[in-house]
Image (cartoon, helix red, strand yellow):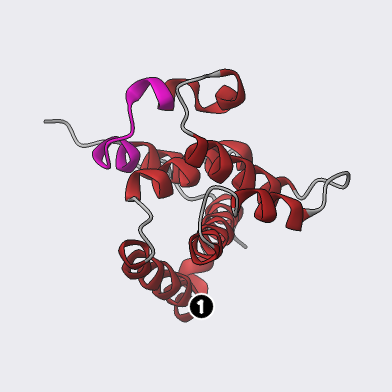
Amino acid sequence: MSHSAPYLDKFYPEIYRGLGDVTRKLRELFPEVDLPISLIELVNTRVSQINGCATCLSIHVPAARRAGVEEFKLDTLSAWRMVKEFTPQERAALELAETLTLLPQDREISLAAVEACEVFAEEQVAALEWTIIMINAFNRVSIASGHPVIRPRKR
């Protein structure tokens, strides 16, 4: 009997590949709906912070840097509401990300999407919502599986 959590991606790789397929489709969609990868990675990082997924943070924080997210924004991301440097689009995307991740009882989920539509087109909000759903899924798979943190390569 094993004393470690099963790696879900190893036990049912076809299901895990399906998650990857959805993510690849989204990556193709982002340019079509004019969503910058920097915004997507900012959202991925914030959701991973909320969920406490060290594995996903070790992937998405460096990806956010490569996508051009300012170091200051990454440093202050957990307190973004208090930082004036976040743009209206970033604020709307982060609010949507937090709402869909935390599923608060006192706030209608659709209200965050309606508010996001004040800053984004509907197709952009839909793409953001799919992104948030997918990073939440990957966070949960990594946490449930006990995936290791990915250490950066030394240069």
Q: Position of residue 57 (x, y in %)?
A: 45, 39
**Which corner quadrant holds the N terminus?**
bottom right
- Amino acid, disc 1: Ile
Q: Nearer the viewer, residue 136 or 116?
A: 116
Residue at 41% x, 41% y: name it.
149
Question: Which residue does the numbered mark 1 point to in the structure image?
Answer: 15
The magenta span reads 62-73
Q: At 37% from the left edge and 69% from the top edge, which residue is drawn?
A: 29
Q: In this view, does 53 lie to the left or right of 31?
A: right
Viewer-side residue, 4 vs 98: 98
**Vertically, is 54 above or below 5?**
above
| Residue 67 located within the stretch drawn in magenta | yes
Total labels: the figure holds 1
Quadrant location, the C terminus: top left
Up/down of 83 relative to 116, above or below: above
Q: Which residue lies furthest to the right in this view?
A: 106
Q: Is residue 47 visible?
A: no
Q: Which residue is drawn at 81% across and 45% down?
A: 104
- The residue at the point 38 percent across, 73 percent down is 25
What secondary structure is the stretch in magenta mostly built from?
helix
| Residue that lies at the very extreme toward the bottom in this rendered image | 14
- Residue 100 is left or right of residue 37, and the answer is right
**x and y, in percent, of residue 9 in the image:** 48, 68
Asked whether residue 130 is drawn in magenta, I would say: no
